[in-house]
Amino acid sequence: MEQLLAKLYQTNHLTHDEIVELLGNLTPEGKKELFRMADETRQRHYGKAVFMRGLVEFSNICKQDCLYCGLRRSNPSADRYRLTDDEILSCIEEGHELGYRSFVLQSGEDFRYTDASLAAIIRRIKSRYPEVAITLSVGERSEACYQAWFEAGADRYLLRHETASRELYETLHPGMSYDNRVQCLTTLKRIGYQVGAGFMVGLPGQTARHLADDLLFLHDLQPEMIGIGPFIPHSATPLAHESGGTVDQSLVMIALARLFIPDAMLPATTAMGTLDPVGREKALRAGANVVMPILSPLAVREKYALYENKICTGDEASHCRHCIEMRIVASGYQIDLGRGDHCSVTGPCPA
Ligand code: SAH
Ligand code: SF4
């Protein structure tokens, strides 16, 4: 195990068999060493900065039916909402006043927001606040649509690959195709977006071999951002009775992702904070360097339930900012409210 960790630290790579071996033999001391290496690697690339992104969850309407997600179209108990353009703008305005310069617009796959109408929202935000970075996370669309949004001013796109196992992917996503997911990610990269991929940990049927596939997939794709979090079963989905992922397993995968793709922007996800009150702080110490406080209007927060018992659904945006900032500083890191671009955008990434 020590040898594998040392090799990973030096080369930022392991073979599929080596990853499986490492995952099967990690002792508590091995984990500590892994987290220390990941934290040191993140420090070399981004110092102690934790980049803040204000998250606006603007619609929970979705045409997809992902088995794990509370927003899936077959969940009749989801209380659906859509924010108007003005409502989205006022979330951004509030975030801007709080100091955020990086925003994520996320939703279900809601085609009521057309190629043109979302482009118009992006343009409105960019003409009012030219200095901010906009990240979209609204699922699979056509190349022409991704191109139009990029031209309207979108800088980044989050589209987790969810799992790099074709078989597992297609079981969990009825009517969707693994090839199309991967195609979307390569298209987004080619257009010029900073791209975020990522996966859930603890999916039903997921083994160490699948997780090794995920790391190697990320190593090939070299995304600028990587979202990793535990799968949390939602009671109104077909996976209600599955056991789900743990914070511990997710921390190991976050640390490994930091070592496989050293310059990635890696969020300490809300799902980590939901399973453990200090899950996000633990993620920061395991190599994560981004936090995404929620800016959505209080009235809709609970309705954006990918999973249940999500944290921060009752807190004002200003409260969230202070709460998370306190936690970051207490963990020994520093808040960065800037655009938070990937190091390849701002200058050459450190070797
Ligand atoms: N509709 C878009 C964006 C919203 S979903 C999309 O699917 O890309 C954002 C992410 O939430 C998904 O990529 C998935 O990884 C995560 N997610 C959904 N349901 C979840 C659950 N039950 N537990 C943990 N994460 C979940
Ligand atoms: Fe829709 Fe995204 Fe949930 Fe899938 S994960 S059902 S695409 S919101």
Image (cartoon, helix red, strand yellow):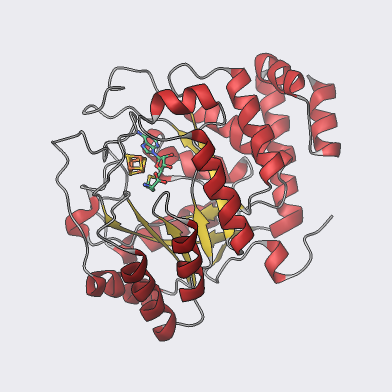
What x and y, as percent, mark residue 77? Answer: 13, 36
Residue 104 percent coordinates (x, y): 43, 61
Which sits in the foreground, 68 or 257? 68
Quadrant showing the C terminus = bottom right
In the image shown, does 171 or 260 lie closer to the viewer? 171
Who's the residue at 30% across and 35% down the image?
A: 65
Q: Provide residue 238's location: percent of width, then percent of height.
A: 27, 22
Q: Is residue 106 visible?
A: yes
The quarter of the image holding the N terminus is top right
Q: Quadrant of ligand 2?
A: top left
Residue 81 located left or right of residue 335 = left
Residue pictured at 35% horizontal, 29% vertical: 174
- Residue at the far bottom in the pictured view: 128
The residue depicted at 66 percent of the width and 58 percent of the height is: 48
The answer to which of 319 and 44 lies nearer the viewer is 44
Examine the rendered structure and indicate whether residue 32 appears above or below residue 159. above
Q: Nearer the viewer, residue 333 or 17?
A: 17
Q: Residue 129: image x %, image y %?
A: 44, 82
- From the viewer's perspective, tell me whether residue 128 is left or right of residue 307: right
* Placement of 38 over or under 298, stated as above or below: above
The residue drawn where x is 81% and y is 24% is 4
